[in-house]
Amino acid sequence: MKEPDGATPLDPDEKAGLRFPHIDTRGELDQMEHVNIQQGLSWIGRKHITCDNLLTDHFTRELHKQLFSNVWTWAGQYRQTEKNIGITPFQISVQLRNLLDDTKYWIRENTYPAKELALRFHHKLVQIHPFPNGNGRHSRIMTDALLKKCLIEETINWGGRELNNSGNIRTKYIHALRLADRGDYSALLKLYG
């Protein structure tokens, strides 16, 4: 399967976690994941979520599991392998806890305007890259939940399914994330702020 620019390649052990071994194209995988993500979004809609329980390790993993467990056996489990993006696997739980604690502080102290806070959270979650796959989609959905439940703001129009495929929107998004890696959030704010 050819991956879009910025996508995380799977190692053979992670591919073995695919619940549908007959899938051999990115399009088939995307379709299966899309159906599961819709179910995960329904789960969020039915669940009573407060800011306190959203900004937890448990919720972060449970959300990933709800979004991808019908496709991947390892959904909701932190990755154990190095990737082309993300921190060393053994640092994931500590760095995630730091991000969640920082985000609580940012909210409490009104450190950033709501959209900037959400985009900083989104970037850091993508940068940590906790899971073998689905990190971008998971972090966008978690960021939208953060906006709705903690910041009482409208969600972000990320670009829909176009963002998951190669194209102009994805190119701008990946470029903005890479600038944010260097501390420059201006492109992310221009795209989504």
Image: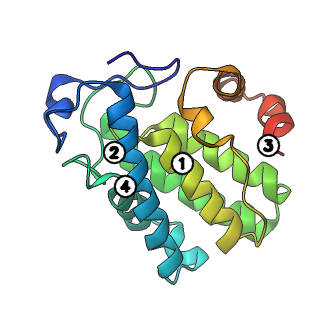
Q: Taking 80 as reference, is 167 above or below it?
A: above
Mark 1 nearby-residue class (10 Å; few <14, some 14–19, many ≥20): many
Q: Are marks 3 and 2 in contact (CB under 8 Å)?
A: no
Q: What's the CA distance linking mark 1 and mark 3?
A: 14 Å
Q: Are marks 1 and 2 in contact (CB under 8 Å)?
A: no
Q: Residue at x 80, y 53 (%)?
A: 115
- Kindly state the secondary structure of the residue where label 2 is placed: helix
Type of residue at label 1?
Answer: Ser
Q: Quadrant of the N terminus?
A: top left
Residue under numbered circle 4:
36
Q: Position of residue 185 (x, y in %)?
A: 78, 33
Q: State which mark lies toward you, 3 or 2.
A: 2
Residue under numbered circle 2:
32
Q: Is residue 139 visible?
A: yes
- Kindly state the secondary structure of the residue where label 1 is placed: helix
Q: Residue at x 50, y 75 (%)?
A: 53
Mark 2 nearby-residue class (10 Å; few <14, some 14–19, many ≥20): some
